[in-house]
Image (cartoon, rainbow, N blue to C red):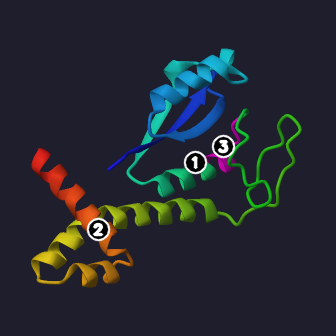
Amino acid sequence: MSQFTLYRLRDNGGDLLYVGVSRRPERRIHWHLKSQPGREMIDPSRTTHEVFSDGLAASIAERAAIASEAPEFNKAGVFTAYIPVARRRGRRAAPAVEDGALTRLVDLAREIAEALDQRPVAIHEARTAGFTWDEVAHGLSLSRAQAINIHNDWLKKRTES
């Protein structure tokens, strides 16, 4: 399963410059250092990473971080109509969001990611118990091919370990 990394780029004073998500964070950070506005301000030693097993959870955490931490140079992914963004460099502040709403959203995304991580085990247990591929797929709201692929990928990783 692919991992997604939420990264934060800061300047030497600790101020947040960028927040982003990537499957290949080293390459993405290198891109920031080579070609993005504010690149001369980035202090690579102050970069932080948070790893997610699911892209949806990582994306929601990214959006929440952009909204709540207001990085200086982020543009993409800011929901200005729904999430407050600090007034910086001409950005308009958006209407306030109920306290804790972003935290609840990130928590929900993590729960979804954990549930998705459990699908291969559930599929394996259902198949071992005698359920057909069609029954397993229907129970998890997947196509038959998706259920088989998830199961086969999981078996492959188990045998490689």
Q: Residue at label 3? A: 69
Of all residues, the one furthest to the top in this rendering is 40
Q: Are marks 1 and 2 in contact (CB under 8 Å)?
A: no
Provide residue 42's location: percent of width, then percent of height: 62, 20
Magenta stretch holds residue 3: no
Q: Amino acid at mark 2?
A: Arg
Q: Which mark is residue 39?
A: none
Residue 79 horizontal side relative to residue 23, left or right: right
Answer above or below: position of 88 versus 133. above
Instruction: Point out the image quarter for the C terminus.
Output: top left
Q: Amino acid at mark 1?
A: Glu
Identity of the residue drawn at 61% across and 52% down: 64
Residue 102 horizontal side relative to residue 70, left or right: left
Q: Residue at label 1? A: 62
- Foreground: 42 or 122? 122
Q: Which residues are magenta?
A: 65-71
Q: CA distance from mark 1 to mark 2?
A: 24 Å
Secondary structure at badge 1 equals helix
Residue 143 horizontal side relative to residue 93, left or right: left
Q: CA distance from mark 1 to mark 3?
A: 10 Å
Does label 1 or label 2 sit earlier along the sequence? 1
Q: Residue at label 2? A: 119
Provide residue 156's location: percent of width, then percent of height: 17, 52
Q: CA distance from mark 2 to mark 3?
A: 33 Å
Q: Amino acid at mark 3?
A: Glu
Answer above or below: position of 127 versus 120. below
Q: Quadrant of residue 139?
A: bottom left
Secondary structure at badge 2 equals helix
Q: Count the marks: how many?
A: 3
